[in-house]
Image (cartoon, rainbow, N blue to C red):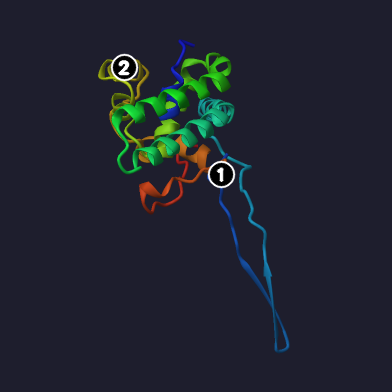
Amino acid sequence: MKRLPLLVGALLITINTLLAQENNFATRGDSTIVVQLRPVDVNTGRNWSNDTIRYRYNQMKYYVTTILPYLNAATAMMNELNAKEQQPGISRKELKAFVNVKEEEIHKRFDEEVSKLNETQGVLLIKLVARQTGANIYSKLEEYKTTFYAIKWQTWARFHGFNLNRRYDPDDEPMLEHIMQGLGYPLPPCYGEREPAQLTIY
């Protein structure tokens, strides 16, 4: 894959985990026994409409699971950057220096692995960083790097069907949402209250 800058990755739950918690009541005389059932992940017996959709789902799930370590690291880094931004009196120069230090840390830790990602995995990584942080990635790139840098990666993203200059919209990504929530990654609170993702394409 064309080498993705890790800053993009940094700026940048398989049915939705259906957890059924039910109370099983058995009445014996005047006693009531209450049994709390364990959560159950219902993930078998899908009736796929065709093999192509099944393949796409399984492939996307595989790709997502391979990039989770990088997603977790990128999200943690973004949270650190956001916390740093909120510090009273911090200058733009200090913030950029902090960004450079964090970028170098990510490079040393993940550069070799991330450079082996294919284009689809790269796009998924950027989408999921946007999902997990609720950020406009373009604005972050422009703020932390330069406008030219942001335009360069926006051009790359648009060529691959994704717009860095808008927030991630869960409604646009039903399959990806289903996979992420099935893997234990519910939508962050910044998206407000929403119904769990329902996969309607099988």
Percent across and percent down for residue 71 are 51, 31
CA gap, disc 1 and disc 2: 33 Å
Is 95 left or right of 67, judged from the image as shown?
left
> Among all residues in the image, which is located at the extreme top?
2
Is any part of residue 201 visible from this angle? no
- Of residues 14 and 124, the one nearer the viewer is 124
- Of residues 35 and 130, the one nearer the viewer is 130
Percent across and percent down for residue 74 are 48, 31
Pointer 2: what residue? 149
> Among all residues in the image, which is located at the extreme left?
147
Is 65 left or right of 102, judged from the image as shown?
right
| Image mark for residue 146 | none
| Image mark for residue 184 | 1
In this rendering, the answer to whether 30 lies above or below 132 is below
- Of residues 84 and 40, the one nearer the viewer is 84
Q: How many marks?
A: 2
Percent across and percent down for residue 163 are 31, 26
In this rendering, the answer to whether 22 lies above or below 1 is below
Percent across and percent down for residue 94 are 35, 29
Amino acid at the residue labelled 1: Gly
Amino acid at the residue labelled 2: Tyr
Q: Closer to the N terminus: mark 1 or mark 2?
A: 2
- Of residues 154 and 149, the one nearer the viewer is 149
- Crowdedness near tag 2: few (<14), some (14–19) or many (≥20) residues, C-alpha within 10 Å: few
Cβ atoms at labels 1 and 2 below 8 Å apart: no
Which residue does the image show at 46% across and 16% down from the upper left? 119
